[in-house]
Image (cartoon, grey):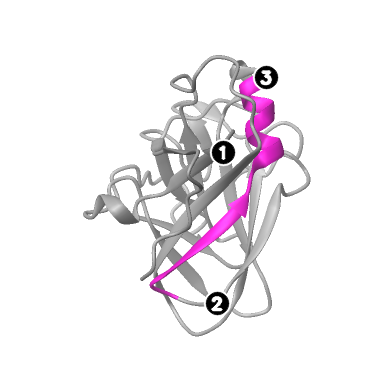
């Protein structure tokens, strides 16, 4: 699979935390899994967080992309993957469909409280339609907000929708081959 394009001035950040949450197993945590899963119909969603504190001070952000590698999909159906900014703290080792952290519930299960858990509008939407392929999401405005207000960086959640029941599996930060792990590409 070809690697995603990284501009010459691009900085690549890897996730500091990622996991997925499942409506089928509402109290399970999947922090150590090698895959991040997103299933159509908001059945399974993925959470990812990047640490921006290593960016040079005064970084003028030109563009930011989230690059995800689709390792596998459950069938040939396409799925819209929507990326939302998360608005509250969560812990990758504790997050479940019910809770953001141990003992602290999401406003709505599945990180679905609009405004409380996540932004109501998606930052970007991409049609996934292949496996063993990279997909890029434009997160420029979201990342710009995190740089301006580091306290607001609670990462993002990816939700799936579309007319076909399908599941897409991305390489996570625990994936065996580092090259395929999620990346935030920042160009300044």
State the residue position of label 2.
129
State the residue position of label 3.
148
Q: Earlier in the sequence, mark 3 or mark 1?
A: 3
- Quote the CA–CA distance across marks 1 and 2: 27 Å
Range of magenta residues: 131-147
Residue at 63% in and 35% down? 86
Query: Where residue 128 sits in the image (x, y, percent)?
Result: 57, 70
| Farthest-out residue, bottom | 76
Query: Where residue 10 sits in the image (x, y, percent)?
Result: 49, 40
**Magenta span includes 139:** yes
Would you call the spot at circle 3 few (<14 residues within 10 Å), some (14-19), or many (20 or more)? few
Circle 3 SS class: helix
Q: Depth check: give the residue in front, 128 or 1.
A: 1
**Marks 2 and 3: which is nearer the front?**
3
Q: Depth check: give the residue in front, 135 or 187.
A: 187
Query: Where residue 19 sits in the image (x, y, percent)?
Result: 41, 45
**Magenta span includes 91:** no
- When asked about the image quadrant of residue 113, the answer is top right
Residue at 46% in and 27% down? 51
Q: Looking at the image, do the residues carrying marks 3 and 1 touch, with CB atoms under 8 Å apart? A: no
- When asked about the image quadrant of residue 77, the answer is bottom right
Q: Quadrant of the N terminus?
A: bottom left
Q: Looking at the image, do the residues carrying marks 1 and 2 touch, with CB atoms under 8 Å apart? A: no
Determine which of the numbered discs, if any, sits on residue 187 in the image.
1
User: Is residue 138 shown above or below 127?
Assistant: above
Q: Quadrant of the C terminus?
A: top right
- Quote the CA–CA distance across marks 3 and 1: 16 Å
Circle 1 SS class: strand
Circle 2 SS class: loop
Residue at 64% in and 63% down? 126
Q: Depth check: give the residue in front, 55 or 110.
A: 55
């Amino acid at each position: 699979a070809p690697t995603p394009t990284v501009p010459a001035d691009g900085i690549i950040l890897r996730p500091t935390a990622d996991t997925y949450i499942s409506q089928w197993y509402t109290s399970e945590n999947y922090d150590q899994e090698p895959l991040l899963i997103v299933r159509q119909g908001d059945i399974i969603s993925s959470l990812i967080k990047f640490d921006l504190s290593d960016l040079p001070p005064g970084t003028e952000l030109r563009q930011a992309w989230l690059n995800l590698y689709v390792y596998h999909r459950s069938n040939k159906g396409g799925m819209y993957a929507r990326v939302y900014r998360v608005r509250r703290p969560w812990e990758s080792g504790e997050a479940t469909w019910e809770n953001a952290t141990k003992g602290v519930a999401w406003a709505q299960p599945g990180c679905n409280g609009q405004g409380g858990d996540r932004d109501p509008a998606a930052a970007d939407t991409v049609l996934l339609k292949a496996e063993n392929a990279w997909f890029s999401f434009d997160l420029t405005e979201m990342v710009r907000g995190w740089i301006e207000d580091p306290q607001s960086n609670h990462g993002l959640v990816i939700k799936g929708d579309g007319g076909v029941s399908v599941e897409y599996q991305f390489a996570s930060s625990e994936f065996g081959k580092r090259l395929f792990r999620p990346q935030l590409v920042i160009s300044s």
